Image (cartoon, rainbow, N blue to C red):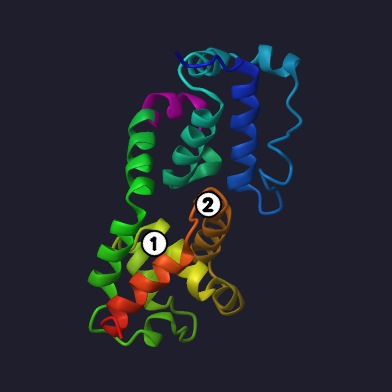
Amino acid sequence: MIPKVKPFDVYKCYLGLKNHFTKPKYDYQKYCGKSRASLQSFYKRKDRFFFERLSRQKNDTEIVQFFVANFVLHPDPYSLWIGEIVKNGEDNYTQWKRNTQSLAYTFKSEIESVFRDKDFDSMFKVTGSSHPEVIKSHLSKELSLETLIILNRILGFKQEFDKKLDDPVWEFLSMRIQKYDIFLHISDVFKYKKILKEVICGGT
């Protein structure tokens, strides 16, 4: 039986994660999900029954993952409403769990598909205002956001891209990488370094 979560706690979690994925300076972990939400404001919401429904379906850990999945997969987290999350949320949550449970397999498959037989360094080269090939590969859905984050953990390219790219597409993606990274639990980065080396260098 799923331990019950209070509807107000679901509401606070929703607000905290929405702030996290839409506000550059807000960090969900740093602020422990705190927001200016009050019990009074919660009971005034006409859509509070959505939070009440979720409180009966998820435990503490699941509700965080559920909201993370939906904010990560939505093209515009700022406009994402709780009613839409409840409507489409389970499908997104299932997809997200599938993605995160097969990280190593997906990473290797995508790296083999995109990087094999290509000049590795050129994939990360910024020329003028053009996006580097690695970003183009993500935008064309050849590289998942998870793979992009793992590559950044290995190579640290984001900092350089932030300095050289000044456009809304990269600005949005850069923040998404930063915000999602803390929720992507990768205990062994060395394993992914090894996979990358094997694909790029043929295991040498």
**Vertical arrangement, residue 77 with respect to residue 118, above or below:** above
Q: Is residue 185 magenta?
A: no
Q: Is 90 situated left or right of 177 in this image? A: left
* Three-letter code for the amino acid on which mark 2 is drawn: Tyr
Identify the secondary structure beneath mark 1.
helix
Between residues 145 and 167, which one lies in front from this camera angle?
145
Quadrant where the C terminus lies? bottom left
Residue 40: image x %, image y %? Answer: 75, 14
Quadrant where the N terminus lies? top left
Residue 68: image x %, image y %? Answer: 50, 40
> For the point 28% across and 57% down, which residue is it?
105
Q: Over which residues does the magenta segment extend?
A: 80-89
Residue matched to label 1 = 147
**Vertical arrangement, residue 116 with respect to residue 18, above or below:** below
Q: Residues within 10 Å of mark 1 (few under 14, many from 20)?
A: many
Residue 46: image x %, image y %? Answer: 58, 13
> For the point 24% across and 79% down, which residue is it?
116
> For the point 37% across and 40% down, which residue is it?
97
Q: Quadrant of residue 45?
A: top right
**Vertical arrangement, residue 123 with respect to residue 46, above or below:** below
Please tell me the numbered disc located at residue 180: 2
Overall secondary structure of the magenta section? helix
Please tell me the numbered disc located at residue 119: none
